[in-house]
Amino acid sequence: MSVGRSRIEPNLAAFVEVVIFGFGLEFSEMREYTHGFFNNVAEIMDDGFVKNLSHVVPLAFSSCNLDDGSTVDINESDDENINGFGEVSLDDEAHDEPRLEISV
């Protein structure tokens, strides 16, 4: 953010291209960093960020629709206090439905 809009704008297209490529590698960390990158760029660019929305919005929806499954290691056990959690909700694939649908 300390760079400022006037310095980043001429070089932004190249960075956006590389960041979108990284998002496509399907590593959760890369998805997270991609969203962080666009968050920072949006703050710097202000209304100039609008032209990037056609790239950014589909990435955000893609992340929202991911089925990452359980984030807790669940053992077959009668113990109600699993790994320090009182109750754990699992993602049931049998009833898996899209979390978000967009029609364009």
Image: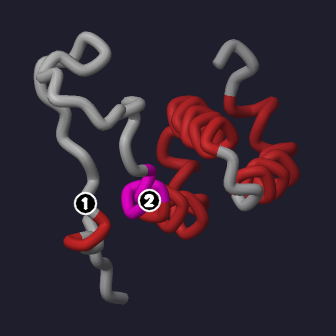
Numbered disc total = 2
Name which of mark 1 and mark 2 comes first in the sequence: 2
The residue singled out by tag 2 in the image is 66
Which residue does the image show at 64% across and 42% down from the upper left?
34
Magenta stretch: includes residue 67: yes
Identified by mark 2, the residue type is: Leu
Q: Quadrant of the N terminus?
A: top right
Q: Quadrant of residue 28?
A: top right
Lateral position of residue 66 relative to residue 31, left or right: left
Residue 92 numbered mark, or none: 1
The vertical placement of 69 against 84, above or below, is below
Q: What stretch is highlighted in magenta?
A: 63-68
Element type at mark 1: loop
Magenta stretch: includes residue 30: no
Query: Residue 45: in sight, yes or no?
Result: no
Lateral position of residue 21 relative to residue 79, left or right: right
Identified by mark 1, the residue type is: Asp
